[in-house]
Amino acid sequence: MAIEWQDAVAEARDVTGFTGEVVQRTIDGIGAALRLDHRADFYTELGALADSGGFDAFLNHWWTQALADSAADGDAREQAIDFADVTVSLYARATGGPTSTQAEIEALVTGAEAS
């Protein structure tokens, strides 16, 4: 699945024109790129994941947040979020995974505690 992710990142760069730094879509990469106030929530949610079925949604959500957190300013943040949305959609399409909106992903990640 690493190749599908790399292809999605490359295609999303072409589509969006995003030239910013791309955060690695790994636990360490995301954790390092998050602001401190988000980092605690990230590791708390990681520890609460019940199964691997939600892991991709978890990574997608927090990878998007990490890109936003590492942006230099408001314009760069918006570009990073647009790039992340396109990348995640392309990756989901390439892997035959569910295509979820960012709101659905957030509900899945944060709603696990309420379920």
Image (cartoon, rainbow, N blue to C red):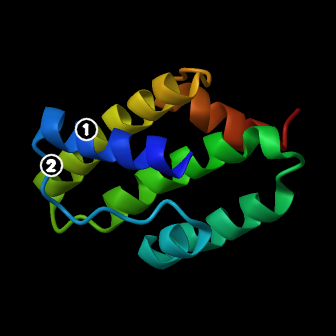
The image quarter in which residue 72 lies: bottom left
In the image, residue 36 sits, relative to residue 109, either above or below, namely: below
For the residues labelled 1 and 2, say whether their Cβ atoms are less than 8 Å apart: yes
Packing grade of label 1 (10 A; few <14, some 14-19, many >=20) is: many
The image quarter in which residue 26 lies: bottom right
Secondary structure found at label 1: helix
Q: Which mark is residue 12?
A: 1
Is residue 101 or residue 73 the one in the foreground?
A: 101
Q: Give how far across and how far down residue 35 sits, in percent.
A: 44, 73
- The residue labelled by disc 2 is 18
In the picture as drawn, the residue positioned furthest to the front comes out as 3
The kind of residue on which mark 2 rests is: Phe
Mark 1 vs 2, N-terminal side: 1
Q: Quadrant of the N terminus?
A: top right
Q: Residue at x 48, y 22 (%)?
A: 93
Is residue 19 or residue 73 the one in the foreground?
A: 19
In the image, residue 61 sits, relative to residue 20, either above or below, namely: above
Q: Give how far across and how far down residue 81 sits, in percent.
A: 30, 44
The kind of residue on which mark 1 rests is: Ala
Using the numbered discs, state the Cα–Cα distance from disc 1 to disc 2 in whole angstroms: 8 Å
Q: Give how far across and how far down residue 69 sits, in percent.
A: 35, 64
Q: Quadrant of the C terminus?
A: top right
| Residue 84 seen in the current view | no
Secondary structure found at label 2: loop
Q: Residue at x 35, y 42 (%)?
A: 7
| Residue 24 seen in the current view | yes
Q: Residue at x 59, y 33 (%)?
A: 105
